Image: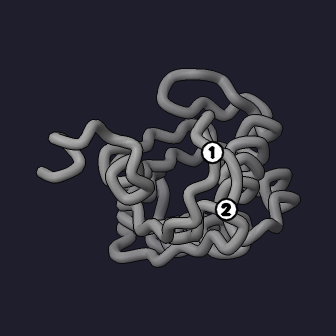
Amino acid sequence: MAGQADGEHYKNTARRWFTEGWAGNTALADDIFSESVRTNGVTVGVAGSKHRIQERLAGFPDLSSHIEDMFSAGDKVVARLVWCGTHTSSYGGIGATGKQVAVPDFAIWRFAGGKVVEISTIQDQFALLKQIGCLPGEVQAA
């Protein structure tokens, strides 16, 4: 069972990734994530963790994040955050819109052996699509 010092270390590790890693320092992934890290049940490894942020940075080069809440319990860290950026290039198959977004995100990380081995995330895709104007008119107006 992880102690209080471990919990603080885990929170600091997550904070570094959400601030520095998401700002482009993807080399941090080598120190933070296990080679067999799973995201939402799929093994993505370190390379997958880097790739996900590189894709987001390609679509939103001014990407930043704001951590709203962060808690640790045992071997887990829970973070509620908002990522922001300007959609200046294709992202998820959607061409650049030039629109700014603020997307709520929620993550649970599990640590083992000093590294993140499991990630569960929920991102408000509806908010993202609404903000960049990619919903049908009647849905967009709601």
Q: Nearer the viewer, residue 21 or 11?
A: 21
Going by the numbered disc 1, the residue's amino acid type is: Gly
Q: Nearer the viewer, residue 92 or 79?
A: 92
- In the image: residue 141, left or right of residue 133: left
Q: Is residue 94 above or below residue 63?
A: above
Quick one: label 2 or label 1, which is nearer the N terminus?
A: 2
- The quadrant in which residue 22 appears is bottom right
- In the image: residue 120, left or right of residue 27: left
Q: Position of residue 107 (x, y in %)?
A: 43, 52
Question: Residue at the location (68% across, 43% down)?
Answer: 52
What kind of element bears circle 2?
loop
Residue at the extreme front: 137
Q: Position of residue 15 (x, y in %)?
A: 57, 72
- The quadrant in which residue 51 appears is top right
Going by the numbered disc 2, the residue's amino acid type is: Thr
Residue at numbered disc 1:
95
Residue at numbered disc 2:
88
Q: Position of residue 121 (x, y in %)?
A: 43, 43
Judge the density around disc 1: few (<14), some (14-19), many (≥20) Cα neighbours within 10 Å.
few
Residue at the extreme left: 142
Question: Residue at the location (74% across, 35% down)?
Answer: 48
**Labelled pair 2, 1 in contact (Cβ < 8 Å):** no
- In the image: residue 106, left or right of residue 15: left
What kind of element bears circle 1?
loop
Judge the density around disc 2: few (<14), some (14-19), many (≥20) Cα neighbours within 10 Å.
some
Mark sitting on residue 77: none
Q: Position of residue 58 (x, y in %)?
A: 75, 54
Could you tell me if residue 9 is visible in this image?
no
For the rendered model, the colour scheme is one colour
- The quadrant in which residue 101 appears is bottom left
